[in-house]
Image: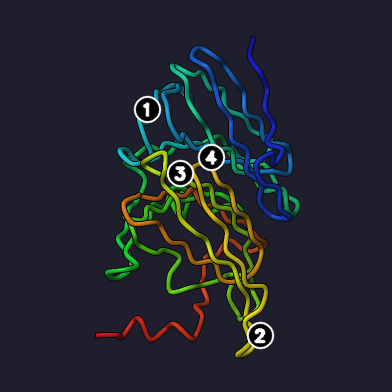
């Protein structure tokens, strides 16, 4: 019997973006349905499934690029697990979204990969749901930190307080080794004053969501770090405001 799943934000539920993490047993069928005013992105984190008449396989986030499905408002996708697998469901329910077309499959070849940063803050960023996919509010991708490196760096934000588009974001973390760990910093600025400073200790499976402030990430030496990221807001435009105190890094010799 096919189970019907409507994203509920079980892993993270913010005002603009929600995240569910779904484990499927081999042979288990599931139907992911987007409510009439929601849009949903289904990302294969690990395992093998079939959907929309094709098979998607991913042994690990560290060895293969993502496969995903964009589900428009009111749409749905039937998924069959060919082996034990994990799937991430990202959704936004903000505003009055109108139905738009049919579900769209995103294959590994459709995912663009860009190397960013300099030594010490080098990472690889994969755009999964970006301009090529006609989502209305969602942006989804994946970032890979090499061992000991930083990302979301220099520290940036996108909460709309300095002219950038206001977007809420959620991160879902994995590590290449069981003992891997890292840290996520979260802070805000009011002129020269830093406020609400805190650090989150990251282990495999950690989820961190935030609607405001700067949010740098670092991986411990010896451990590769991965995070799925998803953003949503009233305007689908990813612009970043960097902390002025750290912009000098771009021109450092």
Residue on which the image places disc 3: 174
- Residue depth check, mark 3 versus mark 1: number of the one nearer the observer: 3
Sequence-wise, the earlier of marks 3 and 2 is 3
Secondary element at tag 2:
strand
Residue on which the image places disc 1: 57
Secondary element at tag 4:
strand
Residue 33 spot, x, y in % from top left: 66, 30
- Residue 181 vertical position relative to residue 249 in the rendered view, above or below: above
Query: Tags 4 and 1 in contact by the CB under 8 Å rule?
Result: no
3D distance between C-alphas at marks 4 and 1: 17 Å
How crowded pointer 4 is (Cα within 10 Å; few <14, some 14-19, many 20+) is rated as many
How crowded pointer 1 is (Cα within 10 Å; few <14, some 14-19, many 20+) is rated as many
How crowded pointer 3 is (Cα within 10 Å; few <14, some 14-19, many 20+) is rated as many
For residue 72, what is the image quadrant? Answer: top right
Residue on which the image places disc 2: 190
Sequence-wise, the earlier of marks 4 and 1 is 1
Viewer-nearest residue: 84 or 98:
84
């Amino acid at each position: 019997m096919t189970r019907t799943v409507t994203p509920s934000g079980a892993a993270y539920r913010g005002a603009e973006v929600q995240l569910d993490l779904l484990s499927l047993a081999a042979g288990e069928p599931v139907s992911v349905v987007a409510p009439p005013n929601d849009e949903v992105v289904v990302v294969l984190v690990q395992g093998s499934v079939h959907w929309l008449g094709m098979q998607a396989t991913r042994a690990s986030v560290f060895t293969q690029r993502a496969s995903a499905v964009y589900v428009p408002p009111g749409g749905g996708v039937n998924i069959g697990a060919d082996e034990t697998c994990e799937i991430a469901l990202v959704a936004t329910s903000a505003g009055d979204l109108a139905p738009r077309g049919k579900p769209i499959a995103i294959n590994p070849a459709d995912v663009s990969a860009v190397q960013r940063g300099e030594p010490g803050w080098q990472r690889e960023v994969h755009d999964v749901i970006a301009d090529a996919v006609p989502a209305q509010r969602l942006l989804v991708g994946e970032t890979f930190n090499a061992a000991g490196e930083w990302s979301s760096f220099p520290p940036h934000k996108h909460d709309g307080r300095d002219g950038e588009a206001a977007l809420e974001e959620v991160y879902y973390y994995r590590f290449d080794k069981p003992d891997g760990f890292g840290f996520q910093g979260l802070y805000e600025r009011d002129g020269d004053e830093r406020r609400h400073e805190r650090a989150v200790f990251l282990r495999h499976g950690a989820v961190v969501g935030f609607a405001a402030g700067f949010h740098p990430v670092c991986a411990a030496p010896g451990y590769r770090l991965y995070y799925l990221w998803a953003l949503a807001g009233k305007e689908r435009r990813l612009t970043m405001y960097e902390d002025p105190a750290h912009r000098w890094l771009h021109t450092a010799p």
